[in-house]
Image (tube, rainbow, N blue to C red):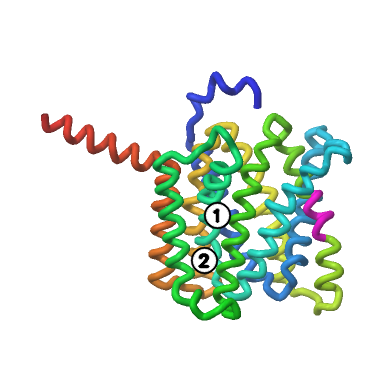
Amino acid sequence: MTGQGKVSTSLSMGRTEWALFLLLALFWGASFFFYKLLVTLGPFTVVLGRMGIAAVAMNLILLARREKLPPLRQWGPFFFIAALNNVVPFALFAYSERHITSGLASIINAMTPIFTVLVAHVWTHNEKLAWNKAAGIGFGFAGVTLLIGPTALSGLGNQDLLGKLACLLATICYGFGGVYGRRFSGQSLFAVVTTQLTAATILVIPLALFLEQPWTLPMPGVSVWAALVGIALASTVAAYLIYFHILAKAGATNISLVTFLVPVSAVILGALFLGESLSLRAMAGMLIIGFGLAAIDGRPFQWLRRRITCSLGGRI
């Protein structure tokens, strides 16, 4: 990543990047659709299938690039980030979609950047809250409060509520993982991701085998196998490769905007293929969380301010 500082001002989204950007939103949104098709499997079994297939594919890609995994003595941090970014949140999302729609799970997932900002404020010295980030956090929590709604008063035995809380806990894991993952900057992104996915596979094997005993389940049907391959190759491997390309060409700020579109693609897929629908409260919650993301990103408000300034200037 060194040597890019001088050209960072020229980073922009070309037509190819915009097309890949939309494809990335589709792939990440599709992961929630795939989770819904995999509810017949245990959550850790789902993670094992997703991580195992993705790890094999990424190791083959790394081999083709003639790169190597780091030595085993350096794998401690990779196991930690694998738990935060893969094993725990993926299992929580797989569990949550037994009780809530894929669209609702994706909307709650949009809280990830908001928790990342909050964790960064506490854990780092150079990423403290500005007014726009504080406003974004406020909008985000207001949106989630609306999404959870009065079911919170029904007690923790409410399965719908447990599904929502599982999603929320997953986004908190992502927030910590996003901040912790910055320690890997400067290393080969392909090697980091491949090691992380391999470490996640190693971590989840005993959890799936001993807690869920997947061999005792009936043989999965074609749709389940297809969903496992889809969530591993499209929503994980292909998504990572697209992410790295856009990151190199357009920068981290531009790629962060994908958060706005992931719930949209997930909701559309859920409506088209799963017969899901969103309540007015869920749509209102998505809108409020969207305001929070816009506040954190800052650019929508900067654009609005420029338009107002130009408009006022034109009248003078």
Foreground residue, 120 or 111? 120
Specify start and end residues of the magenta stretch as a single range: 198-204
Residue 191: x percent and y percent?
A: 76, 38
Report the quarter where the C terminus lies.
top left
Above or below residue 296? Residue 40 is: below
Q: Residues within 10 Å of mark 1 (few under 14, many from 20)?
A: many
Above or below residue 212? Residue 316 is: above
The residue sitting at 33% across, 38% down in the picture is: 303
Report the quarter where the N terminus lies.
top right
The residue sitting at 70% across, 54% down in the picture is: 86
Secondary structure at badge 1 equals helix
Q: Is residue 200 magenta?
A: yes
Quarter occupied by residue 170: bottom right
Foreground residue, 280 or 163? 163
Residue 159: x percent and y percent?
A: 59, 78
Q: Main secondary structure of the magenta part?
A: helix
Tell me which amino acid carries mark 2.
Answer: Gly
Foreground residue, 21 or 80? 80
Secondary structure at badge 2 equals helix
Tell me which amino acid carries mark 1.
Answer: Leu
Above or below residue 138? Residue 101 is: below
Residue 279: x percent and y percent?
A: 42, 73
Query: Residue tagged by mark 1?
Result: 26
Query: Residue tagged by mark 2?
Result: 103
Residue 125: x percent and y percent?
A: 57, 34
Q: Is residue 143 magenta?
A: no
Query: Going by the image, does 186 lie left or right of 209?
Result: left
Query: Going by the image, does 138 lie left or right of 116?
Result: left
Q: Residues within 10 Å of mark 2 (few under 14, many from 20)?
A: many
